[in-house]
Image (cartoon, rainbow, N blue to C red):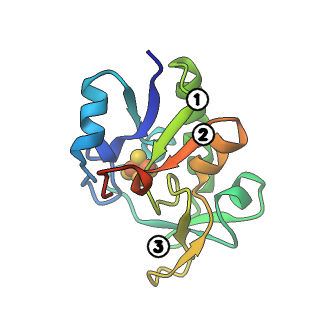
Amino acid sequence: MKRVLISACLVGLNTKYDGGNNYNQVFADMVKRGEAVPFCPEQAGGLPTPRSPSEITGGDGQDVVEGKARVITVKGEDVTEAFIKGAKEALKLAKLIGADTAILKSISPSCGSKCVYDGTFSGKLRDGMGVCAAYLMANGIKVVDSQELPRANK
Ligand code: SF4
C-alpha cells in the first residue's frame, strides 16, 4: 500500500508550538488504516515543544531553502537551521516509507503550502510555502494543503 507523510499535529499528536494539536478525524483514520505516517519537522529539527512561534522573514520557505530568507521566533531567535534540518528529516522519512505525497498543515511556517504569515507577527498572510513544504516539493514530493482535502477543515 502506498503511504503518505502527514503533519503530526493533524492526527492529534501534541506537536504544535503551544503544545496543542490540530486533530482531524479524517486524517487520524488514515493513520489507523496504515495509509499515512505522522511527522513533525519542527520537532525533528530539534526544537522543543512548547516553543516560541516562528515566522519567515524576507520571503517564504522556498527562499529559506535557497538561503535568501530566515525563520525567526517572536523573541527574535534565528531558528532557520532547525527548520531546514527538520525538512531534510521529512524527506528522509518520505523516502523510507516510499511516499510520493505529503499532506501538510495549512499556514504553518514549516508545513504551509499555499500561504504563510508574513514575518511581522501581526496575523497577516502572504502567498508562499513553509520550509518543509518547499523542500519536499523541490525534491519531488507532491504536497497537499490540509485544507484542500474533502471533509478536512484544518
Ligand atoms: S511543524 Fe507541521 S507538523 Fe509540526 S506542529 Fe507545525 S504544522 Fe504541525
118 sits to left or right of 33: right
The disc at residue 46 is: none
Amino acid on which disc 1 is placed: Asp
Q: Where in the figure is residue 65, as x and y percent of width and height?
A: 71, 52
Amino acid on which disc 2 is placed: Lys
The disc at residue 75 is: 3
- Looking at the rendered structure, the secondary structure element under dot 3 is loop
- The residue at the far top in this view is 1
Amino acid on which disc 3 is placed: Lys
Residue at the disc numbered 2: 142
- Looking at the rendered structure, the secondary structure element under dot 1 is loop
Q: What residue lies at 40% left-to-right and 49% top-to-bottom?
A: 149
Q: Which class describes the residues within 10 Å of circle 1: few (<14), some (14-19), or many (20+)?
A: some
Q: What residue lies at 44% left-to-right and 81% top-to-bottom?
A: 123
Cα gap from disc 3 to disc 1, whole angstroms: 36 Å
Cα gap from disc 2 to disc 1, whole angstroms: 6 Å
Query: Mark 3 or 2, which is nearer the eye?
Result: 2
Tag 2–tag 1 contact (CB < 8 Å): yes
Does label 2 or label 1 sit earlier along the sequence?
Answer: 1
Q: Where in the figure is residue 22, as x and y percent of width and height?
A: 28, 53
The answer, for residue 68, to whether it is visible in the render is yes
Q: Nearer the viewer, residue 42 or 11?
A: 11
Residue at the disc numbered 1: 100
